[in-house]
Amino acid sequence: METKSEKSKVSEDVFQDERELENFKKVVESFKSYHYCLTKSVANSLKNFHNLNQKHKEYLMDFEDNCKLLLECIDHNDDVIRLFIRDAELMFENSNALTNKLTEENSDQSNHSKNDVDRVCTTLKQIIRDWSIEGENERQMCYKPILDELINIYSEIKDLSQINVLVPGCGLGRLAFDIATKGFMCEGNEFSLHMLIASNFIINNCFMKNQYKIYPYVDSWSNNINFENQTREIHFPDVSPHDFSNQLSQFSMGAGDFLEVYNEEEKWECIVTCFFIDTAHNIIDYIERIWKLLKRDGYWINLGPLLYHFSKIPGEFSIELSYKQLKRVIERVGFKYLKEEFNVKSKYNSDDQSLLQYTYDSIFFVVQKN
Ligand SMILES: C[S@@+](CC[C@H](N)C(=O)[O-])C[C@H]1O[C@@H](n2cnc3c(N)ncnc32)[C@H](O)[C@@H]1O
């Protein structure tokens, strides 16, 4: 499935087979189930509260009011989510046909697995990382070293739009967007429809800074120092993509699996991976593909940990290399190391107000196709 153009418009032939349409429908339904599932979790919490004995209830006089507030936040999030999916349906050129297909079946929201709705909750948290002022610290840790390196490598180039940069696994697209607004030609690639639907909404339909607000922590029931942590609002986007409409012609999104969509040899001057390479079933496939896609003397910039996504998932193929093994493969494939830094402090969707904090000691490297 592939989508490319100035405004990330997707044509309906992206649905190469019924399975892809089914997947799209499932993702849209998971967004629609958000309200039902989150409301249910508050109802459960209230039910547990009512089962407390009278004395314990009296200790917690504000419990019911807090739950009411949570329900209001969930209602609000649902309104915003409805805008995402309305736009997702419009993303498709023949949106009527699609909408008909989507409404053919009655959605039974209770059918949705916790996993599907967890992905919606994660998407809301990813908005903090990529498109809110609260995410600035994470972006400084994870995206800035990459942006600085790009500027440094191509400091002699007058017209940066001659430099094609690919960002596989770009999440909500902020890093790719920032690369394009620095003057490069940049394409983000992502296969999660949750991410693609939300990034499409933000990049193509937000016209003002901080135009929308969401309450992304309503599902965070643990590690709160006070109740207000759970009902904190964040505004997005922290920059108006509309203000960059000139540079946006240099930005595109490619939808689909990196290994399936990108095959053309020697197309890219630079490939940037941030918290991505450990998403592979076999990381060696990613390294070989990056090699193939890069032009001669092209650069690969990487920052992130090695938290192998398929490790220990029953039935999933997964090759987990240590960094030293990985480096050996990178060099054997033919890359030359130009830079290597360890212990690069970085965070991923972390909540700075939570009692649980974790920081990655990421690896940052720049290699060149020799
Ligand atoms: C850990 S997230 C990092 C996102 C982003 N780079 C960032 O730093 O915020 C990894 C992303 O890669 C995407 N992804 C995983 N495997 C992929 C694949 N084979 N092709 C395209 N995207 C993929 C996931 O959907 C997810 O959004």
Image (cartoon, rainbow, N blue to C red):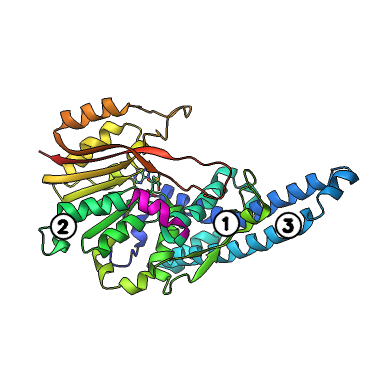
**Could you say where residue 342 lies in the image, as x and y percent from the top left?**
30, 35
**Could you say where residue 246 lies in the image, as x and y percent from the top left?**
26, 73
Q: Residue at x 27, y 29 (%)?
A: 326
Question: What element does badge 3 sit on?
Answer: helix
Three-letter code for the amino acid on which mark 1 is drawn: Glu
Residue hosting label 1: 105
Q: Which mark, residue 66?
A: 3
Mark 2 nearby-residue class (10 Å; few <14, some 14–19, many ≥20): some
Separation (CA) of disc 2 from disc 3? 52 Å
Residue hosting label 2: 163
The stretch of residues the image draws in magenta is 134-143
Magenta residue check for 135: yes
Labels 2, 3: front one:
3
**The C terminus - image quarter:** top left
Horizontal side of 280 relative to 43 (left or right) equals left
Horizontal side of 282 relative to 30 (left or right) equals left
Dots 2 and 1: beta carbons under 8 Å? no
316 to 79, vertically: above or below: above
Image quadrant assignment for residue 34: bottom right
Three-letter code for the amino acid on which mark 3 is drawn: Asn
Dots 2 and 3: beta carbons under 8 Å? no
Labels 3, 1: front one:
3
Q: In terms of sequence position, does the residue under pointer 2 or pointer 3 come before the other?
A: 3
